Amino acid sequence: MRQGLHLMRRYLNISKNGMVRSLSNAPPEMDLGVSSEIDKVRAGKHLKITAASTRQPVIAEAMVTEIKMESPAVRGITLKVDHPNFNFKAGQWIDMFIPGIETVGGFSMYSSPAQLAEKRTLELGIKFSKWPPAFWIHNQCKVGSSVAIRVGGDFYFAPEIGDPSHDLLLIAGGVGLNPLASIFSHACHLYKLHQENSEEYCPGKIKLLYSAKTYEDLLYKKVLDAICSDIPNVEVQYFTTRSMPPESSNVKYGRITQEDLKTAVKSLDMSLLKTFICGPPPMIEKMNENLLAVGLSQNQLIYEKWW
């Protein structure tokens, strides 16, 4: 613990700046719009807003080993973490302490826990903004840069051996795909483990509905499609809301509708269905409303909202 505090102090003096996020499976508030001025204020409270969230005691040093553009606006970075006690559950996020920047970042992993266990690496996809941690990642971060990180969050999928075989419905908007991509990959990894050892946990069907503004904004599409072609009972349906996708693509133009949700739910076992939603608050509100309308109960809906 002392080593972790030393790392944190070494990198920065913690301020109240950060990113706002919240987790719930209660009905989201109806009025979720925020003005630009309010948004600026709220965007400085990551540590305060997430104060009640579970956090691991380990604060580990991490080094950037790879940088790539995942879309025109999203930069992907790979972090190498050698600390043996550093781990995370699929869907969780990290506090990021950046040298010389007082604002503490908050970013969800899109890689699976299995990748960390096997390679000691994790992957993040960060959308460009002038918010200091994101701005640093897009404009100053380079291979060899070091940061300190700490895992937190209660939005995750971490079944244990003997748990019921849940079907999963994952609904993502924009960079809200990050924690859901981690859950998606983790569930598929568990399926492979079950194929090798029948005593391991076996997930049920997995369906991901993912919406982005344009075809170019769809994140990790090649990786998701490759997983779908390799594992049965796994499906991704893509949507674009601002521009028509290529005719040859398997992408639907328009928002995720109640009818889309109804079709997805019908293909799954409602009695053992878990639904994870992550995206902009207005989208979450609409998805929550439509999922209740097609027969799901509120306790089946788990969401994390960003603004």
Image (cartoon, rainbow, N blue to C red):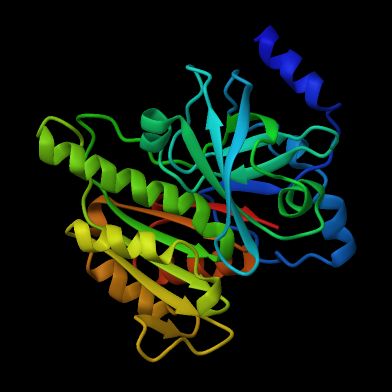
Residue at image coords 17%, 59%: 232
Q: Which residue is at the far right?
A: 37
User: Quadrant location of residue 200?
Assistant: top left
Number of disc labels: 0
Q: Is residue 179 visible?
A: yes
Closer-to-camera residue (145/52) = 145
Q: Is residue 16 left or right of residue 121?
A: right
Place residue 127 in its image quadrant.
bottom right
Residue occupying image coordinates x 52% and y 44%: 123
Q: Position of residue 188 (x, y in %)?
A: 27, 48
**Quadrant including the C terminus:** bottom right
User: Where in the figure is residue 229, as x and y percent of width and height?
Assistant: 22, 63
Asked whether the viewer can see residue 256, the reply is: no
**In-image side of 7 versus 166 (left or right):** right
Residue 183: x and y, percent?
40, 47
Q: Who's the residue at 50% across and 64% down the image?
A: 219
Horizontally, is 268 left or right of 292 in the view? left
Residue 103 picture location, percent across and down: 82, 39
Of the pair 106 and 28, the residue shown nearer to us: 106
Quarter of the image with the N terminus is top right
**Would you say 125 lies left or right of 96 here?**
left
Q: Is residue 220 above or below residue 184?
A: below
**Figure check: 137 above or below 278:** above
Q: Does 48 sit above or below residue 23?
A: above
